[in-house]
């Protein structure tokens, strides 16, 4: 019985330490990748850990109870570098960068 209690305690401590040392998971579902668009507003959607804080280009974005987020970003003509960051309660950060070219003259198929 003592071995099981010790093993459970060690597992709990290991889990706590590993969560402290890891960056939060960050997944961007939209836009899928860097691209060229012909419209000035782009929807960003994704998911992270529910306790993380999300920022897109330094602006805090609302996170629902499941860790999902969505934000519309206004684009400027030319190259737009969009930085999405997730920061957990321990200050660890995950970062994804999307490069979007806004060209109002591009014709989509």
Image (cartoon, rainbow, N blue to C red):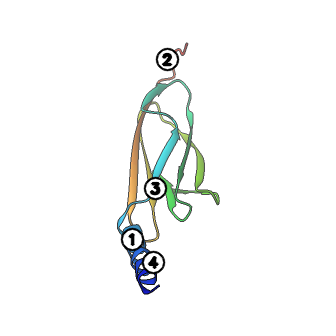
Q: Which residue is mark 1?
A: 20
Residue 31 placement, left or right of 64:
left
The residue closer to the viewer here, 32 or 56, is: 32
Q: Which mark is residue 58?
A: 3
Asked if the residues shown at circle 4 and circle 1 are in contact, with their CB atoms under 8 angstroms apart, the answer is no
In the rendered image, residue 2, in percent from the top left (x then y), is placed at: 43, 87
Q: CA distance from mark 1 to mark 3?
A: 23 Å
Q: SS of the residue at dot 2?
A: loop
In the rendered image, residue 71, in percent from the top left (x then y), is placed at: 59, 46
Q: CA distance from mark 4 to mark 1?
A: 19 Å
Q: Earlier in the sequence, mark 1 or mark 3?
A: 1
Asked if the residues shown at circle 1 and circle 3 are in contact, with their CB atoms under 8 angstroms apart, the answer is no
Residue at horizontal 38%, vertical 65%? Answer: 92
In the rendered image, residue 88, in percent from the top left (x then y), is placed at: 45, 65
Q: CA distance from mark 3 to mark 2?
A: 29 Å
Q: Which mark is residue 106?
A: 2
Q: Earlier in the sequence, mark 3 or mark 2?
A: 3
């Amino acid at each position: 019985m003592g071995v099981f209690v010790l093993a459970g305690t060690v597992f709990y401590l290991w889990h706590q330490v590993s969560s402290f040392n890891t960056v939060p998971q960050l997944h961007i579902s939209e836009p899928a990748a860097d691209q060229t668009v012909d419209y000035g507003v782009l929807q960003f959607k994704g998911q992270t850990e529910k306790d993380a804080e999300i920022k897109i280009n330094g602006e805090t974005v609302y996170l629902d109870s499941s860790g999902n987020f969505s934000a519309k970003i206004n684009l400027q003509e030319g190259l737009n570098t969009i930085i999405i960051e997730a920061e957990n309660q321990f200050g660890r950060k995950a970062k994804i960068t999307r490069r979007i070219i806004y060209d109002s003259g591009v014709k989509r198929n």
